[in-house]
Each structure stands twice: as structure tokens, then as C-alpha cells.
């Protein structure tokens, strides 16, 4: 079984996780895709990840381990290929917190990798934590749909935190009014 094309993630120090597409020169077709994307002689023993990031200077992905010619020239990384170690932000002796996500797809591993590599650099658009993030990218490559469960959950959480107290106060006020008026409307 080929693992290339699977969604891979690593937990961040915050409550979020960073997501990408796992890549390894496992087949002739995937190796050819990697070479055509500008990765000269990809090492079949190396583990890579194609991921979408802001790439702000000083971030763990800004220039660390980048194998993306398109991203090296732009200064803003967008979609890039890094080693698994650089993606996870760990030394070889450490055990990163993360894993693979089981997301059903009708696409072949080669098609998922092709879609991901076709978006290297700034082709996936401007990074936006709610509307266009790393999970949108990984899900798009794997399923053809731009969705992000972490963005959806964050939006639901924000609505709950912001509006629940106001709703409860409004309901309490309505109940108080009904009690004071003796149930007369």
C-alpha cells in the first residue's frame, strides 16, 4: 500500500494541528511527478510533506528543509514541500505528536500528489486561517473540495462563546418579565 497522498498532521503548541499531504518516491509515477515539479533526484528513503502555510519569517517552515523551487524564490511560501522532520518540527531522536487522517477519496495516490504539486508556491491563493488554510489545501488535494473542520469548529466555538451569554440574558429577561406580569401578555 502506498502512503503518498494520505493526509498527515502534526499537533501544534496551540490547540490546532498543521495538515499536509504525505509524499514519498514510492512508485515510478510519483517519482516522475516529484521530478517534474522541480525536485531533482528525490530520495526514495526520505519522507516529505506537501503543505500550505503562511511562511512568516521566523516560523518553523519559513526556510527549513524546503524542497520547493517555486517557494524558495518567492519569500512567501504558500504551498511547499518539506521533509517530514521539518514539517513536524522535530529532531530525528524525537517522537512527533501527529499521524495520518483517514479521509475517503476516489482519487488515486498519483492524482492527489499531482494536484498538490500543481499548487506549489502561491497557486493555492492567500493563506487565511478561516477560509483558506492547510486543511482546506489537504482536503482539496484528496477530495476536490475545500473544507476545513478546524475552521468550522472554531467558528462554531466563537459563535457559542460570543452569543450564548447574550441569548441566556435575553431569555432570563423574558422569563423575569413573564413572572412580573403574572403570565399576562
Image (cartoon, helix red, strand yellow):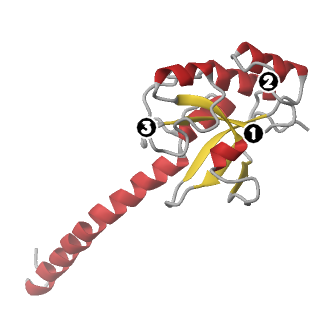
Name the residue that disc number 1 marks: 6
Q: Is residue 168 visible?
A: yes
> At 45% from the left edge and 44% from the top edge, which residue is drawn?
58
Measured in 3D between alpha carbons, the distance from the residue under mark 2 to the one under mark 3, in whole angstroms, is 26 Å
Going by the image, does 91 lie left or right of 73? right
Secondary structure beneath dot 3 equals loop
Name the residue that disc number 3 marks: 131
Measured in 3D between alpha carbons, the distance from the residue under mark 3 to the one under mark 1, in whole angstroms, is 22 Å
| Rendered position, 141 above or below 29 | below
Measured in 3D between alpha carbons, the distance from the residue under mark 1 to the one under mark 2, in whole angstroms, is 11 Å
Of residue 76 and residue 8, the one placed in the foreground of this image is 76
Quadrant housing the C terminus: bottom left
**Upstream in the sequence, badge 1 or badge 2?**
1
| Rendered position, 42 above or below 5 | above
Determine crowd level at label 1: few under 14, some 14-19, many 20+ residues with C-alpha closer than 10 A: many
**Upstream in the sequence, badge 3 or badge 1?**
1
Where is residue 11 shown, x and y percent of the image?
60, 56
**Rendered image: mark on residue 110:** 2
**Upstream in the sequence, badge 2 or badge 3?**
2
> At 89% from the left edge and 20% from the top edge, which residue is drawn?
28
Q: Is residue 108 visible?
A: no
Secondary structure beneath dot 2 equals helix
Of residue 14 and residue 106, the one placed in the foreground of this image is 14
Q: How many numbered discs sit on the rendered protein?
A: 3
> At 28% from the left edge and 62% from the top edge, which residue is drawn?
162
Please tell me in which quadrant of the rendered image residue 113 appears: top right
Amino acid at each position: 500500500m502506498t502512503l503518498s497522498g494520505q493526509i498527515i498532521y502534526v499537533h501544534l503548541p496551540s490547540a490546532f494541528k498543521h495538515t499536509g499531504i504525505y509524499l514519498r518516491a514510492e512508485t515510478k509515477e510519483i517519482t516522475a511527478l516529484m521530478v517534474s515539479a522541480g525536485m531533482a533526484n528525490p530520495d526514495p528513503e526520505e519522507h516529505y510533506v506537501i503543505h500550505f502555510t503562511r511562511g512568516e519569517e521566523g516560523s518553523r517552515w519559513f526556510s527549513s528543509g524546503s524542497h520547493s523551487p517555486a517557494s524558495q524564490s518567492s519569500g512567501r511560501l504558500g504551498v511547499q514541500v518539506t521533509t517530514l522532520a521539518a514539517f513536524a518540527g522535530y529532531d530525528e531522536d524525537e517522537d512527533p505528536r501527529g499521524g495520518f487522517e483517514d479521509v475517503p477519496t476516489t482519487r488515486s495516490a498519483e492524482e492527489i500528489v499531482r494536484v498538490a504539486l500543481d499548487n506549489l508556491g502561491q497557486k493555492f491563493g492567500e493563506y487565511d486561517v478561516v477560509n483558506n488554510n492547510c486543511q482546506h489545501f489537504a482536503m482539496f488535494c484528496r477530495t476536490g473540495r475545500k473544507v476545513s473542520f478546524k475552521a468550522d469548529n472554531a467558528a462554531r466555538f466563537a459563535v457559542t462563546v460570543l452569543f450564548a451569554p447574550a441569548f441566556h440574558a435575553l431569555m432570563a429577561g423574558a422569563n423575569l418579565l413573564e413572572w412580573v406580569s403574572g403570565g399576562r401578555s
